[in-house]
Image: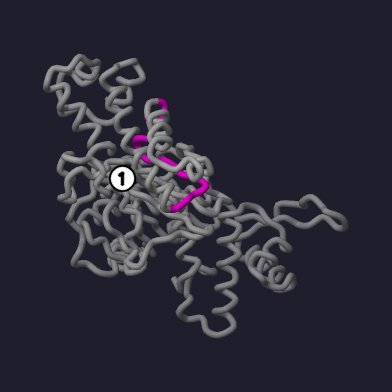
């Protein structure tokens, strides 16, 4: 693309400053939707003539287009501008412990291809990214006429990820600058972060946390993670590792957690724990609908099986999900005491079990937290569903690209 996203290293002085301002305009429209010049001027703290000049250049480049006139608060009706659908494209990728998901979004944040599920799971094998890149190329060839309009890739992954230093200590502890190394494989700017923080980013801009100041987002997937928004800004901690909510020991004499400690929340309330409990129960001969759903093969039991059985009235499955909800609520009660958030969002795979987990969560919060504090906190299950990962990763890439000299 021969416009604002490219050739920045050859641009100096005034032109570099102008290009930076244009990228901020694009980012603003991407996240906020159609907007007037005056609104852009107020948000970006640039003069109206400067905004108008930059917008006209973006129109000439095919990035922005005029959408008509907006409502007037008195006087002349303002012109409204939006991004051209084909101005650019960005890929969002989720890598988890069971599979990967790829989606492609256009400049209006609409998913034009995907979600594509591929059998590549997170592991200590850097060649993983080459295999995912091969799949991405096939997807892009089928849906985008101009490959040069793909500007970046966002990737969410589990583990201890320091986005600032671009490292994942859980899976690639000896590899620094993952963004750059993965970017060389993809041939595009790549931006990575922990899955819980990517989901929080999605909620902050497109979901329940939009417009909120103090929010916690609890991701209950194969593991349990958390994203934190304080005073309207993401909080990552000194080393970028904040939010390891799942590894807080809560259960006395509990099960061994993958982190090596005993009785972590993750060992009783994660998708992995729920699957383990279901398999153990079936092997022990508990009465349940689960064997009929899996052909009497315990190895085929997964979180979907437990949720499906619960929806059919299976008391064993309902009890597993209810117990997980209780422990999750007990953990959230501690978070409420510490953070006093206005909202706690529950997302991830186990959010699909909301009908069975919501009441136990609320009961545990009522039991273990100060009601004067917890009464100010709303608990909600994410409405973004499975797409939260890829849409968050793609938007994160757009956001970061606007800050860099790519």
Could you say where residue 284 lies in the image, as x and y percent from the top left? 11, 21
The magenta stretch is 339-355
| Residue 342 drawn in magenta | yes
Q: Which residue: 21% across, 26% down?
A: 278
In percent of width and height, residue 217 lies at: 42, 47
Image label count: 1
Residue 344 seen in the figure: yes
Toward the viewer: 296 or 62? 296
Between 339 and 311, the one nearer to me in the picture: 339
Query: Hey, which quadrant is residue 364 in on the image?
Result: top left
On screen, residue 323 versus residue 25, left or right, reads: left
Image quarter in which the C terminus is found:
bottom left
**Which residue is nearer to you in this view: 205 or 391?**
205
Residue 291 magenta-highlighted = no
Identify whether 52 is placed above or below 389: below
Q: Is residue 16 above or below residue 290?
A: below
Task: Indicate left or right for 228 with 165 as reference.
Answer: right
Residue that lies at the very extreme toward the bottom in this rendered image: 13
- Residue 337 position in % (x across, y down): 42, 49
Q: Position of residue 66 (x, y in %)?
A: 70, 56
Q: Height in image: 316 above or below 18?
A: above
Residue at 37%, 50% (x, y): give it: 226
Residue 38: image quadrant is bottom right
Residue 120 can be seen in this image? no
- Name the residue beneath numbered marker 1: 224
How does the figure colour the protein chain or chains?
one colour
The single residue placed furthest to the left in the displayed view is 284
The one of 225 and 166 positioned closer to us in this rendering: 225
Relative side of 39 to 242, left or right: right
| Label 1: few (<14), some (14–19) or many (≥20) C-alpha neighbours in 10 Å | many
Residue at disc 1, secondary structure = strand
């Amino acid at each position: 693309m021969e416009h604002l996203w490219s050739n920045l290293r050859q641009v100096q002085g005034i032109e570099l400053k102008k290009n930076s301002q244009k990228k901020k305009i694009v980012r603003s429209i991407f996240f906020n939707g159609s907007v007037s010049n005056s609104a852009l001027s107020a948000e970006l703290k640039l003069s109206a003539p400067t905004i108008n000049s930059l917008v006209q250049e973006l129109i000439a480049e095919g990035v922005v287009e005029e959408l008509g006139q907006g409502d007037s608060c008195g006087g002349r009706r303002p012109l409204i501008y939006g991004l051209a659908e084909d101005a650019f494209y960005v890929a969002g990728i989720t890598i988890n412990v069971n599979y990967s998901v790829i989606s492609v979004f256009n400049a209006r944040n609409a998913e034009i291809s995907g979600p594509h599920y591929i059998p590549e799971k997170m592991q200590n094998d850097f060649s993983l990214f080459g295999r995912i890149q091969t799949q991405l190329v096939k997807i892009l060839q089928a849906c985008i006429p101009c490959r040069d309009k793909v500007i970046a890739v966002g990737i969410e992954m589990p583990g201890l990820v320091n986005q600032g230093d671009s490292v994942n200590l859980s899976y690639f502890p000896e590899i620094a600058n993952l963004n750059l190394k993965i970017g060389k494989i993809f041939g595009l700017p790549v931006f990575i972060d922990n899955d819980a923080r990517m989901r929080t980013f999605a909620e902050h801009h497109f979901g329940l946390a939009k417009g909120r100041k103090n929010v916690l987002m609890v991701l209950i997937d194969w593991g349990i993670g958390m994203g934190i928004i304080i005073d309207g800004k993401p909080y990552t901690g000194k080393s970028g590792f904040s939010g390891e909510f799942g590894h807080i020991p809560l259960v006395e004499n509990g099960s061994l957690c993958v982190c090596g400690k005993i009785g972590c929340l993750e060992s009783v309330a994660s998708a992995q724990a729920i699957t383990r409990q279901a398999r153990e129960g079936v092997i022990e001969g508990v009465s349940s609908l689960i064997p009929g759903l899996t052909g009497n093969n315990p190895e085929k039991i997964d979180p979907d099986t437990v949720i499906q059985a619960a929806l059919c009235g299976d008391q064993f499955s309902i009890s597993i999900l209810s117990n997980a909800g209780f422990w999750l609520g007990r953990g959230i009660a501690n978070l409420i005491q510490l953070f006093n958030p206005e909202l706690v969002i529950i997302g991830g795979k186990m959010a699909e079990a909301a009908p069975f987990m919501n009441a136990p969560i609320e009961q545990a919060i009522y039991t273990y937290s100060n009601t004067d504090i917890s009464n100010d906190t709303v608990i909600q299950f994410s409405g973004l569903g499975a797409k939260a990962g890829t849409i968050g990763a793609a938007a994160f890439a757009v956001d970061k690209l606007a800050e860099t000299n790519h």
